[in-house]
Image: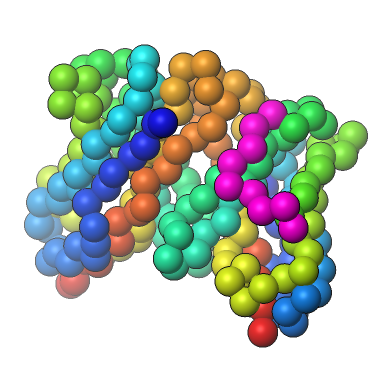
Amino acid sequence: GDSVTQMEGPVTLSEEAFLTINCTYTATGYPSLFWYVQYPGEGLQLLLKATKADDKGSNKGFEATYRKETTSFHLEKGSVQVSDSAVYFCALRNTGGFKTIFGAGTRLFVKA
Amino acid sequence: DSGVTQTPKHLITATGQRVTLRCSPRSGDLSVYWYQQSLDQGLQFLIQYYNGEERAKGNILERFSAQQFPDLHSELNLSSLELGDSALYFCASSAQGGQGSYEQYFGPGTRLTVT
């Protein structure tokens, strides 16, 4: 079945460091891919999405590119801030499916 | 604020008891989803309703049940509670309920503690 695998956390970075959170997926067909973010004490919010191969989703300085050849959707940000400390979830929704499959989440800590 | 509301915010109860969690979706959204988030299991999809009908089922235990009412709010019923049911329960809603790249909007969650 469909699945999403994320790098284990926590990831601890200093402010202004470069961030990469790896995400790979297994799915038949052409899924839509998402990154959601969960700030402390809150529900998940959509951060960005991509719907087809080579699409780049971007928002708030975060980017992720849909790579079908490597079945990956890695999240990147050039310069993180303390306010980016949160849990990040990679997810997919497959064509013809009703479920959104979430990865386990990666916790990010950014130190001042 | 996502527009999705959940009540109560916190719930503490004893093993063997039954509780009901309530969710009101964003205005106009027809689809409601329930998720369970625990430290060891991550975010688990439980069940989805679309315009009052069950649309998809995930890892939902037989002790758990849900429904969506004509006004589109939803309730998740958890019975014969066990210590392992302690978790954050999220409700999400979306305008659509099938395939596509639409966004799900999550509520703030209900934290259930079973003692």
The correct choice, above or below, for B110 with respect to B62 in the image is: below
The correct choice, above or below, for B56 with respect to B18 in the image is: above
Q: What type of secondary structure mainly makes up the magenta span?
A: loop
Which residue is drawn at the image coordinates 58% and 47% (left, top)?
B59
Which residue is drawn at the image coordinates 12% and 58% (left, top)?
A16
Q: Which quadrant would residue A36 be assigned to in this image?
A: top left
**How far across and down, in percent of the image, does residue B106 sit?**
57, 47
Q: Is residue B29 visible?
A: no
**How far across and down, in percent of the image, does residue B56 sit?**
64, 32
Which residue is drawn at the image coordinates 18% and 72% (left, top)?
A112
The correct choice, above or below, for A11 with respect to B1 in the image is: below
Task: Find out whether residue B58 is within the magenta segment.
Answer: yes
Q: Which residues are magenta?
A: B55-63
Q: Is residue B114 visible?
A: yes
Snapshot colouring: rainbow
**How far across and down, in percent of the image, does residue A15 sit?**
15, 63
**How far across and down, in percent of the image, does residue A53 sit?**
25, 16
Which residue is drawn at the image coordinates 30% and 61% (left, top)?
A107
Q: Which quadrant would residue A109 be assigned to in this image?
A: bottom left
